[in-house]
Amino acid sequence: MHPASPPDVLRPINGRAIVAAAALGLNALAAMASAVVGVQRLVLIGDLMAEPESVDVAEVEATDSVATAVAMVQYVAYVVAIVTFLIWLFRARRNAEPLAMWPHRRAMPWLIFGWVVPVVCWWFPKQIMDDIWASSKPGGLGLAHNFGEAQRSGLVWAWWLSWLGAVWGSKLVSNGLHPTDELESIRQAVLVGTVTDALLVVAAVLAAMVVLQISRFQEARRSVAVQQAVIAG
């Protein structure tokens, strides 16, 4: 164990939090739009499977074009959300380190590599967020003797589970589904994609809530440190 540094080393985080939360909100809207288009495609595919003659080919092509355009917008929104989230995450981690009584379980490079390295990507990012949350929340470490014993946040759990569901859904779509009928294959892919988009909406909203809550914890502790410094001065 090492003594925690004084909290006056905390740096402002609200600006980064607002930008990240806004980007996550836009990502959620894009995923929601994609889910709506997915439902429309499911209806059309169902009609095609039931009565092929009842569906106008032009309508199918138009829906496919809209789906492609929405997918492009969703991709851009997703990239922006990732970048702004990581920028916030590095500041949150920097602030959380002096508030902790022990070193965080994962070194700084894992804030990026933890998302892409196979196997560990299923728990490292949550572990990192758990440590930041516990360090930032007043009394978050409680009577724990290490981060493994610290109390977990239900909000962080909800975010992580919805994110994992979305990732697994994306993998199912990208790996392809293999039913015997071609239309059925398309229908299943669209269905999984639509559910994945719905989970992405939930994950993005919950991620924004995590970002804002941790930032509130840190700003509150930074404000106390500033007031103490003024009184001491």
Image: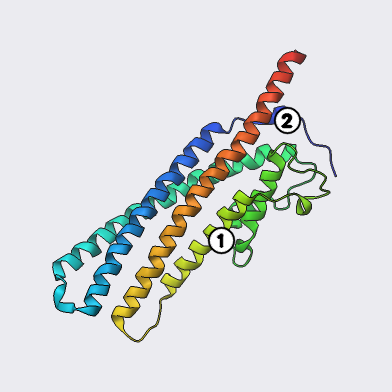
Q: Is residue 170 above or below residue 205?
A: below
Q: In the drawing, does residue 113 fall left or right of residue 22?
A: right
Q: In the drawing, does residue 103 fall left or right of residue 173?
A: right
Residue 145: tell me if it is visible: yes
From the image, tell me which residue sits under label 1: 116
Q: Is residue 182 above or below residue 200?
A: below
Residue count near mark 1 (Cα–Cα under 10 Å), binned few <14, some 14–19, many ≥20: few
Residue count near mark 2 (Cα–Cα under 10 Å), binned few <14, some 14–19, many ≥20: some
Three-letter code for the amino acid on which mark 1 is drawn? Val
Cα gap from disc 1 to disc 2, whole angstroms: 32 Å
x and y, in percent, of residue 188 in the image? 37, 74
Name the mark nearer the viewer: 1 or 2: 2
Q: Is residue 14 above or below residue 41?
A: above
Residue visible at 45% across and 56% down?
200
From the image, tell me which residue sits under label 2: 7
Mark positioned earlier in the residue sequence (1 or 2): 2
Residue visible at 73% across and 49% down?
151
| Callout count | 2
